[in-house]
Amino acid sequence: MSRLLVLVLLAACGPVFTVHRRTSPQRVSVTKQVSEPELVFGGRFVAPGQVELVAKQARDVRVTRVVHYGAASFEAGHYHPIIELVEIPFGLFFALLPPLWESPNILTGTPSTKLVLHNNWLVGMVNPFQTALLYHVRAIPGSNSNVFAAPPATREFRVSLPAPGLTLTYRALDDAERPLATGTIQTDTFGRATVPDVAGAIAFEVKVGSTTTVIPIEPEVAP
């Protein structure tokens, strides 16, 4: 019970409102989201009748950056006990007028200024430990209040890295989807594998595990 009483008294003695003004940037927070890897393939003729297949692990990456600014704060609190002798009777009188119960908008917030009301103005008038007429302002130049931040800046891009050591089961297909060649091959350190003797191929059907992908091949260029 005594702890609750102390907390109530501390809250009653607190400031009526605080004004925060933005200062210089203090820190930058960065969050990153990465998708699950996706196996993608490409293919091209590198010599007459010779196709190079390329396997890559692709991921979609989303990076969000937020700049957080410091704040200089100004707390408006209790002014003088004599003021309460005038303020409390006025507060009791205004308490009989419900249209006046809402706190007036004494300051409009801007991107560089924010107002935080800690108490209703009418409660401040009848509270002997707070005031709503004259304020004692306490400046806090290096406030730790995290109230200012720039809008998040987001970048999205795709990252592709070689997929080495993959075993590819392939079929080289012509324009009538007839197989010109079949076989199994493994990608090298750079995710590449070369298939010879496939002149006239327009696509490759590649199988890795249980996944089958059809890869279009650029037409062979005559020397």
Image (cartoon, grey):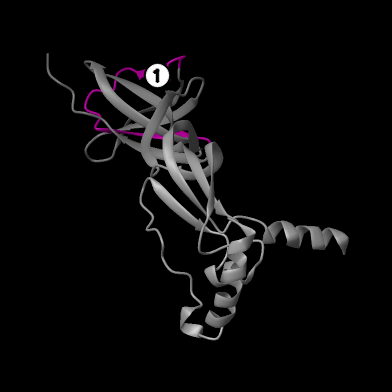
Percent position (x, y) of residue 4?
81, 62
Residue at (14, 20) in percent of width and height: 221
Task: Report if residue 141 lies within the magenta region.
Answer: no
Residue at (55, 86) in percent of width and height: 96
Placement of the N terminus among the 4 image quadrants: bottom right
Type of amino acid under label 1: Arg
| 114 in relation to 40, above or below | below
- Residue 151, by quadrant, is top left
- Count of labels in the image: 1
Which residue is at the front of the view, 183 or 211?
211
Magenta-drawn segment: 188-209
Placement of the C terminus among the 4 image quadrants: top left
154 sits left or right of 77 in the view: left
Residue 130 visible to an observer of this rendering: no
Which residue is at the front of the view, 20 or 47?
20
Percent position (x, y) of residue 159?
40, 29
Residue at (47, 79) in percent of width and height: 100
State the SS at label 1: strand
Which residue position holds label 1? 192
